[in-house]
Image (tube, rainbow, N blue to C red):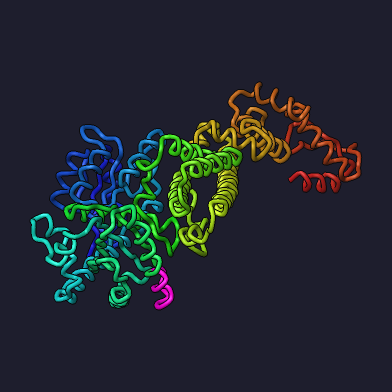
Amino acid sequence: MNVKLLICDDEKIIREGLASLDWNTRGIEVVGTAKNGEVAFELFQKMLPDIVISDIKMPTKDGIWLSEQIHKISPNTKIIFLTGYNDFEYAQSAINNGVCQYLLKPIDEFELYEIVDKLTKEIHLEQQKAEKEIELRKTLRNSRYFLLNYLFNRAQYGILDFELFEISKKAAAMTTFVIRLDTDSTNYGMNFMIFEALIEHLPKTINFIPFFSNSDLVFICCFNEPEGESEQKLFSCCENLGDFIDTEFNVNYNIGIGIFTSEISELEASYTSALQALDYSDRLGQGNIIYINDIEPKSQLSAYQSKLIETYIKALKNNDEKQSKKSVKELFDVMERSDMNLYNQQRRCMSLILSISDALYDIDCDPTILFKNTDAWSLIRKTQSPAELKTFVENITDVVISYIESVQKQKAANIITQVKALVEKNYARDASLETVASQVFISPCYLSVIFKKETNITFKNYLIQTRIEKAKELLEKTDLKIYDIAEKVGYNNTRYFSELFQRICGKTPSQYSESQSIYASRHIGKTPTTFNVINLSQTKRIKFRNILEFKIIKKVLD
């Protein structure tokens, strides 16, 4: 099945150019083009394309408006924004709102193909998953656990499962947790087998309503105790189930725990929040138990504690080791003064780890570096005292600061390499700080700072140095006029070029050329005396003893 593509741009030449690209060989059908967001949305509703390529700024309705309207009715549609450098930050905000990718103008055809090919693969996988889910529904139609998959939708119409209704009437607190297995997404049989094994392994002290949803293992839990007393009981249950999966099946997993509630009508929200907790699993590796309240704990924190955590995260982002360690000390002092028990301190630290994960994502660092070989919650739970827990957080802080520093150094080095290559390529044209900065997608101010830090020379002086070296080569190897050489290395003002050259080299361009000619003749070991020939770099005449000496010197100059 072909992937459908819609193109939207207010410039006719761009949208027609995009439409004329070789899409057919990639299994893509262009279903329409539009000159603004309003027209594009009308076409979208009729054609339902899988991918939309849109300019970000257009008259009437822009690309932001278009993406918002599309995602209201079709969240899975892939959107690619086209934007200029001046709209770079604007495009980034759009990405945070669900846009898949963006491309800077002028558009690189091959870069566009690469992005579209990647999105096409994602679309095909989503289609395959949907088809397999349909097959699964047919296969498990008579399963008790599968039928409960409709629970939350049915609850909206007052059609409640009798078993759940009876259990929930007696429950003081309810929640939902979801187990996501790290298996082949198509291996439903394996996942369902583990699911049935876990049902037999559930503790008898908690009432469970299990069901199977899109390969996830979902458990509604009903407690006789209130929320505060039930949390630790639930965590212990999840830890035992996780150990059972690991021991019996050798399968990696993550567990997300949703909000607690006393109302059956809020179970759907509990289930949704459990899925939100699971979204963090990619950041922390496998084997984690993630509680939604640990992700969003602000309501449970004092204003002072929240401020300490904000200060700590800011210090990490700024690579401020002294301030980050100071914040850790202050946070543990606060927890100690509040008589918080070890379990709650561990929970608070898990929340801190999730905040660190968010911070690393914010600065384009990979948070999985923290726990490559084990899971965060397991390490936290192994601590036997507040002092051990504090040491654990301090060690994590050291690792994060060291990692951020190394990433930033590598990024800076990569940027400098790109900048030098751009200067080497464009020194004769517009190679200003502003122009080069725009080509590597950073601000001129930031480029100026990191260039000086990494090379011990300012960007301006590096550009001048490059141009003067190129000028010296031309003086040595060609017979071009001074004004021609000045123009070729990026200077339209010959007088300014000559003054700059003299200031750096201690000689005018003419003097430098003459000295190179004299040096070449002396290098042969002969004193020119016999006949006159025109030097290759300037019109100045030089005498040679014989024709053989001339031929040798000419070869050196060439």
What span is in magenta? 242-252
Frontmost residue, 486 versus 225: 225
Specify the principal SS of the magenta part: helix
Can residue 198 be spotted in the picture? yes
Is residue 176 found left or right of 404 in the rendered image? left
Residue 247 is covered by the magenta coloring: yes
Residue at x-position 28% and y-position 76%? 196
Depth check: give the residue in front, 414 or 17: 414
Image coordinates for residue 288, horizontal then vertical, percent: 42, 61
Numbered-mark total = 0
Residue 337 image offset from top left, x and y in percent:
50, 41
Q: Is residue 439 visible?
A: no
Q: Left of 555 or right of it: where is 383?
A: left
User: Which of the two residues, 112 or 546, is positioned nearer the viewer here?
Assistant: 112
- At a point 21% along the width and 73% down the height, the residue shown is 136
Q: Is residue 76 above or below residue 454?
A: below
Residue at the spot x=51%, y=36% of the render? 437
Quarter residue 518 falls in: top right
Decide whether residue 463 is among the magenta residues: no
Q: Quadrant of the N terminus?
A: bottom left
Residue 374 to residue 456: above or below = below
- Residue 257 figure quarter: bottom left
Give the x, y percent position of residue 474. 68, 38
- Percent from the top left, x then y, of residue 169? 16, 59
Q: Residue 86's image quarter?
A: top left
Q: Residue at x 56, y 35 (%)?
A: 447
| Left or right, residue 151 beside residue 320 | left
